[in-house]
Image (spheres, rainbow, N blue to C red):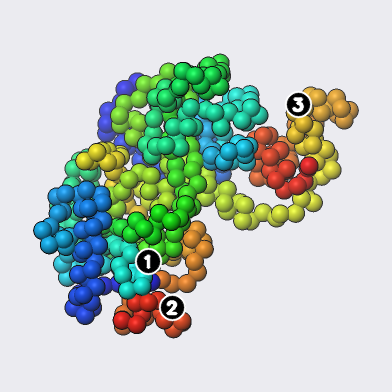
């Protein structure tokens, strides 16, 4: 289950968001070594964690196991305000239906037990596609390792590069524009072999089946 | 011919956009040949990586390698001893073939690196690809000499990613759409495949069956089309996989 948190339900999920910021700190600072994000209280929060952003939170057994964040490109975002040099002088499309996909993380212990695809990662990628359709988005801007481009294409995103891959802080990165349609979700579901929706949007529950919601440990708390 | 960063970027974007719109393996091959040629490459190949003991043939998505080299490479199981393949399994970024480490005691690896230049494959660029389910593939470009700027290498990396993605998506769709029944192959086509599987050339088979080489070639290419194979090696492998021939 991937829970969508935005300004409408952030207040009631304050304890979960606290877990999210600690999860982000463990993943991005402690594990990936993004030391610029280090915080003395162990909660990784930046200037983009505002009312405007959308958090997608994977919860299993009451714990945060995956996370990603969507930022509107009509407001300051990473490609515009943090590393515009990634575009190498080019421009990226922006607009109300184009958002930026940032801070994508899956708990390492969920991935390490699997050689191929683990359910936690599959749910996160499916959740992102479902969230885009729910929010009426046309595309996401993503800055990613080139090897993940293959995966994004395989999952049915209409991806095109916005610049050539380059090294940033020792890691190769390519900025891409990833168009999303119903076919994207369809292709992703085929790749993962998961037919049911995974995204939980409170107030307008996408799940017609109560079983799916009750299946999830966190369902008791929401 | 060195071209500017801006030109490399535009060249790459154009190429990637065209690749995304192509609907046949032949068109993807033609586009790769064109793109590779602009950067000094004469040949290319896209293939999945077989596990230990498996044959390469069914994993080849698209080959722009000299046929004789692909046949020898597949027949001899070079994929399991090639230093380039060893390195591609250990890295995520493109590298020159000449950058693949070769152990001084590795005589089989050295033999492959010595034979490839006889087919015009002196040096090249290998691009590792990883799919969602953890399968790995390689897109590789061969040349008489390698001289790529940093930007050209980055551009070719993207072109390789798109060519592989498009070829794999096409073949997956074709796989899903085609009938598993072998009955649509004619007896003559099956006979030709059986002889081809035992290493006979079209000329040999023609002599055996009392038909012209040209007729045999037609049977084999019809069989390849029906089996969705891109070359004779893959065609034979596919016929074996579907138990059309033993």
Which residue sits at x=48%, y=37%?
A: B138
Label 1 element class? helix
Looking at the rendered structure, whether the residues under marks 1 and 2 are on a common chain is answered as: yes
Seen in the image, is B124 located left or right of residue B193?
A: left
Label 3 element class? loop
Within the image, what quadrant is residue B228 found in?
A: top right
Q: Mark 2 or mark 1, which is nearer the start of the sequence?
A: 1
Q: Confirm or deny contact between disc 3 and disc 1 (CB under 8 A).
A: no
Which residue sits at x=36%, y=21%?
A: B147
Q: CA distance from mark 2 to mark 3?
A: 60 Å
Q: CA distance from mark 3 to mark 1?
A: 53 Å
Q: Which residue is mark 1?
A: A127
Q: Which residue is mark 2?
A: A215
Above or below residue B204? Residue B165 is: below
B107 vs B159, nearest the viewer:
B107
Q: Position of residue B244 (x, y in %)?
A: 77, 46
A46 vs A43, nearest the viewer:
A43
Q: Which residue is mark 3?
A: B201
Quadrant where the N terminus of chain B is found in the figure: top left
Q: Position of residue B140 (x, y in %)?
A: 47, 32
Q: Few, some or many C-alpha atoms within 10 Å of disc 1 (few <14, some 14-19, many ≥20)? A: many
Of all chains, the one bearing label 2 is A
Q: Few, some or many C-alpha atoms within 10 Å of disc 2 (few <14, some 14-19, many ≥20)? A: few
Instruction: Please name which of the two marks, 3 or 1, marks the residue nearer to the observer.
Output: 1
């Amino acid at each position: 289950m991937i829970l969508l948190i935005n300004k409408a339900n952030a207040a009631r999920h304050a304890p979960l968001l606290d877990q999210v910021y600690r999860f982000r700190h463990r993943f991005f600072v402690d594990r990936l070594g993004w030391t610029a994000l280090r915080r003395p209280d162990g909660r990784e929060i930046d200037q983009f964690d505002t009312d405007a952003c959308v958090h997608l939170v994977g919860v299993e057994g009451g714990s945060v196991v995956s996370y990603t964040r969507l930022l509107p490109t009509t407001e300051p975002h990473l490609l515009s305000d943090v590393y515009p040099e990634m575009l190498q002088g080019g421009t990226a499309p922006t607009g109300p239906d184009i958002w930026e996909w940032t801070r994508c993380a899956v708990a390492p212990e969920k991935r390490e037990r699997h050689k191929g695809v683990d359910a936690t990662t599959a749910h996160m990628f499916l959740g992102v596609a479902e969230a885009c359709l729910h929010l009426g988005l046309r595309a996401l801007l993503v800055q990613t390792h080139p090897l993940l481009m293959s995966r994004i294409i395989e999952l049915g995103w209409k991806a095109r590069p916005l610049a050539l891959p380059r090294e940033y802080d020792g890691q190769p990165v390519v900025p891409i524009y990833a168009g999303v349609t119903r076919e994207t979700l369809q292709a992703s579901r085929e790749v993962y072999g998961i037919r049911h929706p995974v995204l939980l949007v409170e107030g307008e529950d996408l799940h017609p089946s109560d079983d799916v919601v009750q299946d999830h440990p966190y369902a008791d708390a929401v | 011919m060195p071209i500017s960063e801006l030109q490399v970027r535009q060249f790459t974007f154009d190429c990637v956009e065209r690749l995304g719109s192509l609907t046949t393996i032949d068109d993807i091959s033609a586009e790769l040949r064109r793109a590779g040629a602009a950067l000094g490459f004469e040949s290319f190949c896209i293939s999945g990586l077989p596990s230990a003991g498996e044959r390469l043939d069914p994993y080849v998505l698209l080959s722009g390698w000299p046929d004789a080299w692909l046949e020898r490479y597949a027949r001899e199981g070079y994929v399991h001893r090639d230093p380039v393949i060893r390195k591609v399994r250990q890295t995520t970024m493109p590298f020159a073939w000449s950058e693949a480490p070769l152990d001084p005691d590795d005589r089989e690896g050295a033999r492959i690196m010595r034979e490839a230049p006889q087919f015009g494959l002196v040096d090249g660029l290998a691009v590792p690809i990883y799919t969602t389910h953890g399968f790995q593939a390689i897109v590789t470009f061969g040349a008489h000499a390698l001289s790529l700027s940093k930007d050209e290498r980055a551009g070719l990396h993207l072109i390789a990613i798109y060519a592989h993605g498009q070829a794999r998506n096409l073949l997956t769709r074709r796989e899903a759409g085609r009938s598993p029944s072998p009955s649509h192959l004619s007896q003559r086509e099956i006979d030709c495949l059986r002889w081809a599987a035992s290493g006979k050339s079209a000329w040999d088979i023609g002599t055996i069956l009392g038909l012209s080489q040209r007729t045999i070639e037609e049977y084999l290419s019809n069989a390849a089309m029906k089996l969705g194979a891109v070359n004779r090696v893959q065609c034979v492998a596919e016929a074996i996989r579907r138990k059309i021939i033993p």
